Image: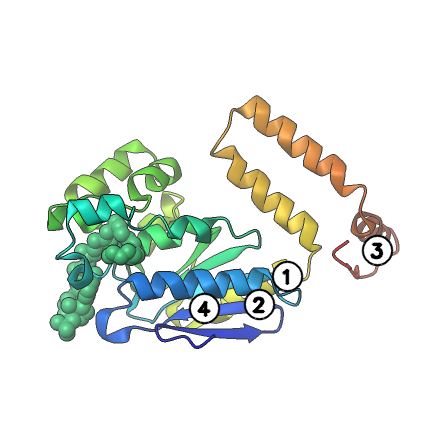
């Protein structure tokens, strides 16, 4: 597939997706939506890929939805076509997706980062949900994921004032998993993704599914779900290989089965 708005590369066992609309600070439009979803689906179907990284430029991961595209949209069109629902396909990716965020991650850009499995931020990253400044509100999970990730008070502050938070604040409140120097962001994200891709894919996919289920169900049900997944891994050769490798003091060779 030819991509116009993103760059798609395979780096060993890692799929790397780079948003590439530099003149619009990687603003997210319908083309970006279609291409990102296609690229992620392609890597999910590729047995040689175990994890993915999505990133932007040093100045902007993504400065939000494309305001110039959205400007003229009517309620009738937005409601009839259920705008942005397509991004839900992105969240159904079964292989891990790491967001490597430098610069601005605003509005839909922050929401896209939060749809990933975890965020590694550069020390120049700035997160925000400034939709209120445009006369609207977050429309792709900003009021839902942000509240679950950082708590009501900070999420309400961000959504109602439209202010940005820097990388340090984002790490303090748990929005991002780690902060690295901007020049090391891509290397660190690729290293993390490569490490994940070396593990047994069924266990990686189940661990992702279990963590995500924690936001969707009760503790009792989540513990039961986790326990059943754990039990099921003992049916796989990789569990035998992983534990034998430890006992024999050698690196495991997982076969993803
Ligand atoms: C749309 C229907 C189709 C359905 C599919 C679409 C899917 C994608 C949508 C998913 C998300 C939807 C829900 C979401 O919650 C809604 C939003 O995200 S609303 C937008 C929120 N973002 C913002 O408000 C940030 C806007 N930008 C800024 O505030 C500033 O640009 C900045 C980031 C603070 C940087 O400021 P500066 O350094 O001064 O740079 P400039 O402002 O000069 O910008 C440079 C250049 O980029 C253009 N640009 C920047 N942001 C956007 C944007 N969000 N949309 C479009 N264009 C943008 C800016 O206009 C400049 O261009 P130029 O004027 O040089 O042509």
Query: Mark 4 or mark 3: which is in front?
Result: 4
Give how far apart the Cα atoms at labels 4 and 1 are. 16 Å
Local secondary structure at mark 1? helix
Give how far apart the Cα atoms at labels 4 and 2 are. 10 Å
Q: In the image, is the residue at mark 2 within 8 Å of ligand 1 by its beta carbon?
A: no
The answer to whether the residues at label 2 and label 1 have Cβ atoms under 8 Å apart is: yes
Give how far apart the Cα atoms at labels 2 and 3 are. 24 Å
Q: How is the image coloured?
A: rainbow
Q: Please report the residue visible at 64 percent of the width from the left and 27 percent of the height from the top.
A: 224
**Residue 158 placed where, x, y %?**
23, 43
Q: Residue furthest top?
A: 220
Residue on which disc 3 sits: 245
The circle drawn on residue 17 is: 4
**Residue 85 placed where, x, y %?**
35, 48
Residue on which disc 1 sits: 197
Residue on which disc 2 sits: 14
10 sits to left or right of 126: right
Q: Please report the residue visible at 24 percent of the width from the left and 43 percent of the height from the top.
A: 79
Q: Please report the residue visible at 22 percent of the width from the left and 70 percent of the height from the top.
A: 24
**Residue 16 placed where, x, y %?**
49, 69
Given residues 101 and 68, the one toward you in this image is 68
Give how far apart the Cα atoms at labels 4 and 3 are. 33 Å
Quadrant where ligand 1 appears: bottom left
97 sits to left or right of 228: left
**Residue 142 placed where, x, y %?**
30, 44
Evaluate whether residue 122 shows in this view: no
């Amino acid at each position: 597939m030819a991509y116009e708005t993103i760059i798609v590369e395979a780096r060993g066992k890692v799929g790397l997706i780079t948003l590439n609309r530099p003149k619009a600070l990687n603003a997210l439009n319908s083309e970006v939506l279609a291409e990102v979803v296609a690229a992620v689906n392609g890597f999910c179907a590729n047995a040689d890929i175990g994890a993915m990284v999505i990133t932007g430029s040093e100045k902007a991961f993504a400065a939000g939805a494309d305001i110039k595209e959205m400007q003229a949209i009517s309620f009738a069109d937005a409601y009839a076509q259920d705008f942005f629902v397509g991004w839900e396909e992105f969240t159904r990716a079964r292989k891990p997706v790491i967001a490597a965020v430098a610069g601005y991650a605003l509005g839909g850009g922050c929401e896209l980062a939060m749809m990933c499995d975890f965020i590694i931020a550069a020390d120049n990253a700035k997160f925000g949900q400034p939709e209120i400044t445009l006369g609207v509100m977050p429309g792709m999970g900003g009021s839902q994921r942000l509240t679950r990730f950082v708590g009501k008070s900070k999420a309400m502050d961000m959504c109602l004032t439209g202010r940005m938070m820097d990388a340090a604040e984002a790490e303090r409140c748990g929005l991002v998993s780690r902060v690295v120097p901007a020049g090391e962001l891509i290397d660190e994200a690729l290293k993390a993704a490569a490490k994940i891709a070396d593990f047994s894919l069924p266990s990686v996919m189940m661990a992702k599914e279990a963590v995500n289920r924690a936001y969707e169900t009760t503790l009792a049900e989540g513990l039961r779900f986790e326990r059943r997944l754990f039990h099921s891994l003992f049916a796989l050769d990789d569990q035998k290989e992983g534990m034998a490798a430890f006992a024999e003091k050698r690196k495991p060779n997982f076969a993803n089965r």
